[in-house]
Amino acid sequence: MKTTLHSDGVTFVVEYTQSKDEYEAKVNGQPRRVHLLSARDGALTLLVDGQSLRIHLASDGQRTLVAIEGQVYEFTQAQKSQARTRQREAGRMDPEVRAPMPGKILAVLVTEGTAVEAGQALVLLEAMKMENTLPAEGTARVKKVHVAPGDLVDLGQLLVELEFVEPTSAPSQAS
Amino acid sequence: MFKKILIANRGEIAIRVARTCRELGVATVAVYSAADLSSPHISAANEAVCIGPAQASASYLNTEAILLAARRTGAEAIHPGYGFLSENAAFARCVRDAGLTFIGPAPEALAAVGNKIVARQTVAKLGVPVIVALEQPSPDPTVLREQVRALGYPLLIKAAAGGGGKGMRIVRHEKELAEAVAAAEREATAAFAEGTVYLERYLERPRHVEVQILGDMYGSLIHLGERECSIQRRYQKILEETPSPAVSERLREEMTAAALKIATAAGYYNAGTVEFMLDSQGRFYFLEVNARLQVEHPITEWVTRLDLVREQIRIAAGERLGWSQDEVRGQGHACECRVYAEDPARGFFPSPGKVLAWNAPSGPGVRVDAGVELYTEVSMYYDPLIAKVSTWGPDREQARRRMAAALRQCVVLGPITNVAFLLDLIEHPAFVAAETHTGFLAEHFPQWQPQDKTHVLEAALAVALSQSHRGRAETSTVQSSSPTPWHRLGGWRIGV
C-alpha cells in the first residue's frame, strides 16, 4: 500500500508491505521496520526500527496533525494543499486577507490605494483578550477594504483585498 | 473556616482554587459563561451556576450575577483568582457590603495600589527607588517635548490604571512622541475607562523580578522570596523561575525589605506581589503591586512547599499567618512555562478550537495546572492560557532539564500551541546561561519557525498507517460494534 503525504512543502511517499502488526515500510525510499504495539485513545505506540514512540494524531480527513516529543507536524494528502505553512514557505501569497478567527475590528490601518510592504499592519483584530495585527504578506497595493472599526467579523470573513506588486509565484509541485 | 466558597473565575485557576478547597473540606461553587460549558472548571467544583453569556463583561465581570450566585448557593466567601475582578476595589467593596468575604486584600489596599501613579508616589516617599518619570504629561506637544528632555529617549508610556500591556508604548524618537501618547490614551480609555498615562525612562535589557508577600489581618507580613519573570512577550509573561539567577543574598534582602515596606504602608494583607525592574548594574526600581494571586505562584509553592491558596483562604477567614519569616526557607529551583493556544510561527496569533488530543506531562518534580482536557473548547472569548507546566529541581539546571523533558511529553492537538517554541526557549544557550532580560524574545526569537524535524519520517509513517487502519476500521464496524480509535480521528475540524 502506497500513501503520498505532504508536510511543510515536503513530500513523503510511504509504502507499507505486509499487514498484521509487523510492517516493512519505505518512506521516501528509506526502509523502516514498523511494529504497531497499540492504537487507542487517538494515539499509536510504534516501534520504528526498535525506537519506541508514542504518537498522537487528530485528523479531519484532509489534514492530519501529529504530535511526537513536543513537536507537531501537519500532513495533507492532496497535492494542491492550502496549508498555510506550505503557502508561506513556497512564497505563494493570498491576495485576500481573511479573519483567522472571529473577533472585533479595532482599527483599519490602510485605505484603498495604500501601498504596503511585507509585514506592514493592515487590520487590528481583537480576540481572546488580545489585539492581533494582520499583516500584508508581501509588497502590495490595497485594492479594497471590506471592514470598518467596530465590525464583528466571523471566521474566514474577507477583510482586505490586496494586489501584489510582484507576480505571485506558484510553487512547483513535487510529486 | 468557611463552609462554602464561590470561585469567581474560570479555567486553570478556578480548578486550582477548587483543589485546595477540597483539601480543606470547604465546598465550592463554580461560575461559568455560556461559552464555557465544556470547561473542566465546572466539574472541579461541587456546584456550578451559569452567570451569563460568553462576553466577559456580561459574565465573569458581572458583579451582580456573581453576587446573586453566591447568595443563591449560600457561599460565604468569594475567591476572585487572577484577572477579571481580582484587583477591582469596587467589586471587593460590593462583596463586603453583601456581607460576604473577599479572599484578597481590603478594598482600601486594592485602591491604594491600583493607580500606578499614586502607587509610585507613595513608594518614592518610602525611599524605595522608582524609575524616573513624567507623571503629568502636557497636552501641548511643544511643552511635552520640553518636559520629556529630562527623561531622554527611549521612554515608555504607561497607563495609570494599567495592566497586561494595554496602553503601553515604547517611544524611541521625539517625532513619534505626540502620536504615541494619543494612541496610549485611546487604548487605556478603551481598556480601563480611564485614559490617564505617564511617561517613564525606558530601561534597556532589565530583568523583571518580583517578591511574593503574605500577610494576615493582624499586621504579620512575610515574604516568600522572589521570582524572575523576564521572558515576556508584549508584557505577557511566558516563562518564570525562582530563585532569580541574578539576585544575590544581599540583593534579596534589600528587595524583600523594600517589598515589605511597601505592603506595610498600603495596609496590605493576604497574598500579593511587589514587582521590580532590575537593571544590568544590579539596581532595582519599583514597578507595581499585583494585589492578587499570581499566575506564576506554583513556582513559589514548589520551593517553599506552602500552598498559597490555602494561606489566602485561612487569612481571609481571620486566621493568623502561622509562619514566621525564619520558618520559610526556599529549597531548590523551580520554573514554569505557560502553554498558550497561540501560533508562535504566525506572530503568536491566538488559535482557539476544540482540544482533540491531550496529554499532560507527569512524573516526580512535575506539576501541571491545566484549564483544559480532551474535547474542551478553547474559546476565543478569554485568555489563551490553557495550561502551566512547572518543574522543581535541586538546582536550576536540573529544574530546566526536567522542564525540557516534561514539554516533550506535552500533547495538545486542535488549537495550535507554543509548546515547540517553549522547548526551543528552554534549550537556548542564553537561557541555559541565565542571561535573561525583558527583551530576550525580541533579541533571540524575532521570527521563530518550528525547526525540529527529528521525527517527521516517523510522523509520516504513523499517518500512513492510521489511514490504512481507518479504511479497515470502517469496514470492520459492520461485523464488530466495538469502537476503534480511528473513529475519533474523523470528527476533527480545522479552522480555515
Image (cartoon, coloured by chain):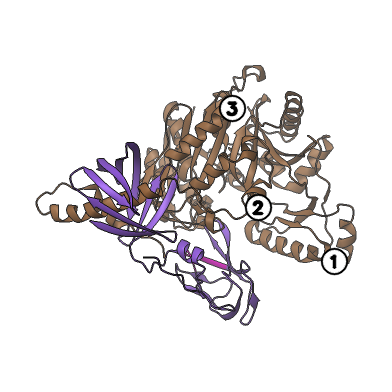
**According to the colouring, which chain is brown?**
B
Disc 3 is attached to a residue of which chain?
A: B
**Residue A161 among magenta residues:** no
Is residue B314 in sight in this rendering? no
In this figure, which residue is indicated by the disc labeled 3? B333
Q: Nearer the viewer, residue B187 or B6?
A: B187
Q: Position of residue B421 (x, y in %)?
A: 53, 47
Quarter of the figure with the N terminus of chain A: bottom left
Instruction: Name chain A's colour.
Output: purple
Q: Amino acid at mark 3?
A: His
Q: Amino acid at mark 1?
A: Pro
- What residue sits 82% from the left and 34% below the top? B126
Badge 3 marks a residue whose secondary structure is strand
Q: Residues within 10 Å of mark 2 (few under 14, many from 20)?
A: some
Measure the C-alpha gap from mark 3 to mark 2. Answer: 28 Å
In this figure, which residue is indicated by the disc labeled 2? B165
Q: Position of residue B390 (x, y in %)?
A: 51, 34
In this figure, which residue is indicated by the disc labeled 1? B141
Q: Nearer the viewer, residue B87 or B437?
A: B437
Callouts 2 and 1 close, C-beta under 8 Å: no
Q: Is residue B356 left or right of residue B94?
A: left
Which region is colored magenta? Answer: A99-105
